Structures are given as C-alpha cells and as structure tokens.
Image (cartoon, grey):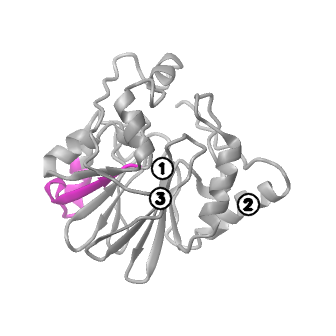
Amino acid sequence: MRIAEHVYLVASGMQGCALTDDLDCNCYLFDSGAGLVLFDSGAGRDIGRIRAVIEADGLSVEDITHVFLTHGHADHSGGAAAIGAAGNARIVCGAATGEVLSIGEVGISLDAARRAGVYPADYRYTAPVPDRIVGSGETLEIGRLQITALPTPGHSADHMSYVVNMTGTGFLVSGDALFHSGRIIYQATYDFDIGQSCKSIQTIAAQAFSGLLPGHGMFTVSAGQRHVQAALAAIRAMSPPAPLQLVKL
C-alpha cells in the first residue's frame, strides 16, 4: 500500500490496519532506486500475505536488499529470516538487538509474551542472524536513501529507530519507541524502562523529519513532530507519556 513517494506499508496486523497477519507489526518498504529496503518484518506466520501486498504494488520480495530491525521482539523480527532468504537480503540491526536475538526467546521476552497469551502456544519463532551491525549515529547510504541509526531504548533495551532521508524528505521509523499522538506502550517485560523511554523521546525530538512511521497503529507522512511534542509536553510536566492501549481483539 503506497503511502508516499517511494514508501509503502506492506504489513500491518490487528493493532494496525489488518493488512496482513494479526500478529504483524507495521512494516515499511522504501524503494531506494537501487533495491528495496524493508523496516521490520512482522511475526513470520504468513510471509505469503506480505509478498502479495508487495506484489500488488508492482514490487517484488526478491528485490529487497536490506531488512532493518528496530528491535528483537517477535512481531518485528519473526519474518526477517524468511524475507531475507527470499531475496538474499542483508539483515541489519544494532549490536544490542543482535545480542538478544542470539539469546533466543528469553532475550526478546517471547517466553513471557506467550505465557501472557499475546502469542498463541503454537507460535513458532525463527530468529534471524544479522548480516550487518549498525552503530549509534551511523549513516548508511543505499541508493537515494540516507539511513541513520538512532538508539532509542525504553520499550526494550535494544530498541533502535531510523531516520530515513530521501531527496529532501525525512521519515522517522520509530518502531515501538513512539506512536501516533505521542503515546508509548507500557509492558511488564524485563527491559522496559519508562525513564529510558522519556530520554529517547527527547532524542527523537532533536531529529529532523516529517513523516512518523511507528510499529503499530496510525502513521503520518507529514507533521510528525507534532506527535513528538505531545509526548514531550507530558514529560515536561513530569508525567510519563500517555499509554497506547493494545486491546485484544
């Protein structure tokens, strides 16, 4: 689903627009002019539906050259191995994400999420193996894209956001660090940290971008900073940002 020039939403689950499998996060595909670049990969239960969405836009999974992960949680990383293999794409993430992926289900809190009923008992997770570790503040140039890695811990200790600049237009792929209307997810995982979330929002606010592309719910293609400022207003008042309530449907 094209959302801006050279930018597509290719996966979104029940906490988004129900474009693909219920467990999928929002996944964004950029056409770099030198291959396709995917941000996050969904839960991996039905890659065929993601492929169908991509093909409906006249694109091909086989042309994906890079899969960037914002963090290791299964709804963001579970499809990376299969999607990467389909097009021989390189999987890119921060060092902390690479570490939690190597630990397995405990590292990404999948064991706790399964016990809580977030994932069904029969869900099978395939951990991707990163091909490229990107450092804090490092910029990768891929075709027309300049992609800068921005550590944004809080939602999880390994969380990374990405500023994507393209021919004068900037997008922030915020993953689960920040959502529409300045909200964040509160969760009882071992590495959730509200203080770190607040610091990460302040880091995000210092970036130049127009579109806000979060991991769940509504996205924006312009005026993205308004949503950052909503979160900052709460922080300045010594309150945490408002929670994003993920209702079980």
Dot 1 amino acid type: Gly
Give the residue at x 35% y 36%. 43
Q: Which residue lies furthest to the bottom in this view?
A: 168
Which dot marks residue 215?
1
The local crowd at label 3, few if under 14, some if 14 to 19, many if 20 or more residues have their Cα within 10 Å, is some
Query: Is there any visible trace of residue 23 in the rendered image?
Result: no
**Residue mark closest to the camera, 1 vs 3:** 3
Do the residues bearing badges 3 and 2 touch, measured as CB atoms within 8 Å?
no
Using residue 58 as the reference point, say whether residue 186 is left or right of it. right
User: What x and y, as percent, mark residue 149?
Assistant: 44, 60
In terms of sequence position, does the residue under pointer 3 or pointer 2 come before the other? Answer: 3
Which dot marks residue 52?
none
In terms of sequence position, does the residue under pointer 2 or pointer 1 come before the other? Answer: 1
**Residue mark closest to the camera, 2 vs 1:** 2
Judging depth in this view, the residue of 81 and 50 nearest the camera is: 81
Give the residue at x 33% y 36%. 78
Residue ID for mark 3: 136
Q: What element carries label 2?
A: helix
Residue ID for mark 2: 232
Q: What stretch is highlighted in magenta?
A: 51-69
Give the residue at x 48% y 52%. 160
Q: What element carries label 3?
A: loop
Dot 2 amino acid type: Leu
Query: Is there any visible trace of residue 144 in the rendered image?
Result: yes
Does 210 sit above or below residue 52?
A: below
User: What x and y, as percent, mark residue 197?
Assistant: 65, 48
User: What x and y, as percent, mark residue 106?
Assistant: 45, 23
Which image quarter holds the N terminus? bottom left
